[in-house]
Every structure is written in C-alpha cells, then in structure tokens.
Image (cartoon, rainbow, N blue to C red):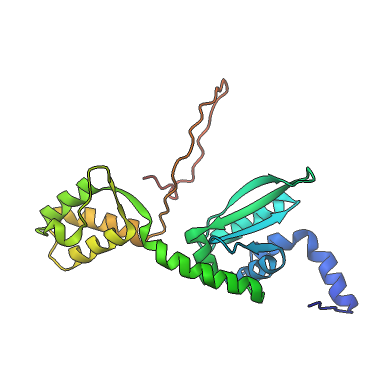
Amino acid sequence: YQLTLNSIAIKQLVDKMKDDLFLLVSKSTKDVVRAFIKGFTDAEGCVDKKRPRITIAQKNEQTLNYIQMMLLRFGIRSRLELSKRKSGQVISVLRFDNRDFYMFASEIGVTASDKREAMEQMMKHCEETYSKEIIPVHRSEIINLLKQCGIKVSSAMQSRSAEYNYLSRANLEKVILALDNVTVPKECVKNVNFLKSLLFGHVRWERVRKISLKENNEPLYDISVQGLTNYI
C-alpha cells in the first residue's frame, strides 16, 4: 500500500523535524515510541520463519542505535552487528530473539499480515521453551535453603545428576511456590526475597562467550552516577 499526502504544510513539517526525528520520538510517550518502532519494523524488519528472531538492517548505524535504545524502554534487549553482503557492502544489523522476540511480539508487534503470521507461530515456540531458561543459582544453595525452611527437597526440585549445577526457570518457580506455602524462618527471608527478585525482576542473564585482555598504558576511569549504581 502507498499513502500519498499532497500538503505543503505537512512537507514543511517533515522538512523541519526530519533531522531531529529520532530525538523527538525518544522524548515522546511510550505509546508514541511503540507506534514508531512498529511502523519501522513493518517497513525495515524481517521476522524469521525458522526461529524466534527479528532482524533490522540499515546502512546508517546511528539509526539502529536509536531503535536499540527505544527498545530498552520496553525491556527488550538487542545486539548490533556488522554484516557483509555478497556485493561486498557492509551494513549494520540489529537482531533480537528468543525471550526478547517474545517481549517484542507481546509489547509492540507488527501490522503487516505476513510478518504478524510468522510472529504468532514463533510466539508459540517461545511459550514452549521459555520455561527452560537457566537461572545461574547453584542447586546446592537452593537445597540448603529448602532444608532450612523445612521443605522436602524432592517435593520442590527435580532430581538431577551431579553435572547439573543450576536451575531452570520452571524449577525455580516451583521452589518459590513451595516457599510461599510455608512460614519462612526470619534468617531465610532475605535469601527468599532475593530469589524472587531474580525470577520476577528485570534481571536478565547472558552467557559470557569470550574474555579478552587488552594492554593499556593510559589511566582508566570508571564513571558512575551516585544513587543509581547497581552491582550484583
């Protein structure tokens, strides 16, 4: 479909705001940002039909930097990469998949019928695999906590062999449910609340794929804003 507007006033408005478009949208309400991202994805995005992933490619990297920051307002993480086409042209690519794909589909979505159909199919896939997300909390610590709270471990945790160090999201949800059904000792309340914050909060987990050591002979500064720092 094509929409044509024959209006000098609208042309003047677009000419005046086009250089500051992303800045204006970024300062707007969440509904405006949502509508902008949806329209942008309709036009420039690609919904993968084989995996829960959305890809947006642009020649201008700064455009995707703005989109990436806007997505964070909805808790959606994305990664920005460089990709080389067969022609040799290098373009910037923004990707988000799995849980972030599902959040995008739920919070923003698309209007193009073909993309929406593919998105709905991949949402079903996410719903079936979402509970398998690993939460990096040692099973041994959870076992000790359950025992301190007088809960039979086998009733809240599935038995696993020694090589399983951590819990899945589904298993941790079962542990929290068991803890909610008992009176938690005072000395364990802090740990239980911490587990709940991991499960229901905005903390996300990323596997460290590579650590590189770089030589540096210059001063290195760590800048933080007082009152807003948050360390785990």
Give the answer, above or below, for where 194 lies relative to 115: above
- Residue at the spot x=50%, y=65% of the render? 102
Residue at left offset 75%, top offset 60%: 20
- Tell me which residue sits at (65%, 76%) in the image: 113
Q: Quadrant of the C terminus?
A: top left
In which quadrant will I find the N terminus?
Answer: bottom right
Q: Position of residue 69 (x, y in %)?
A: 60, 56
Residue 138 visible in this rendered orientation of the protein? yes
Residue 107 picture location, percent across and down: 53, 70
Measured as percent of width and height from the top left, residue 141 is found at 21, 47
Foreground: 156 or 25?
156
Report the side of 2 relative to 96 (left or right): right
Give the residue furthest to the top.
217
Camera-nearest residue between 65 and 207:
207
Seen in the picture, residue 33 relative to 90 is either above or below; the reply is below
Percent x, y of residue 62: 70, 51
Give left or right: position of 7 versus 188.
right
| Residue 124 vertical position relative to residue 223 in the rendered view, above or below | below
Horizontally, residue 43 falls left or right of residue 162, namely: right
Decide if residue 109 is in sight here. Answer: no
Say whether residue 71 is left or right of residue 131. right
Count the marks: 0
Residue that appears at 47% across and 66% down: 125
The outermost residue toward the front is 50
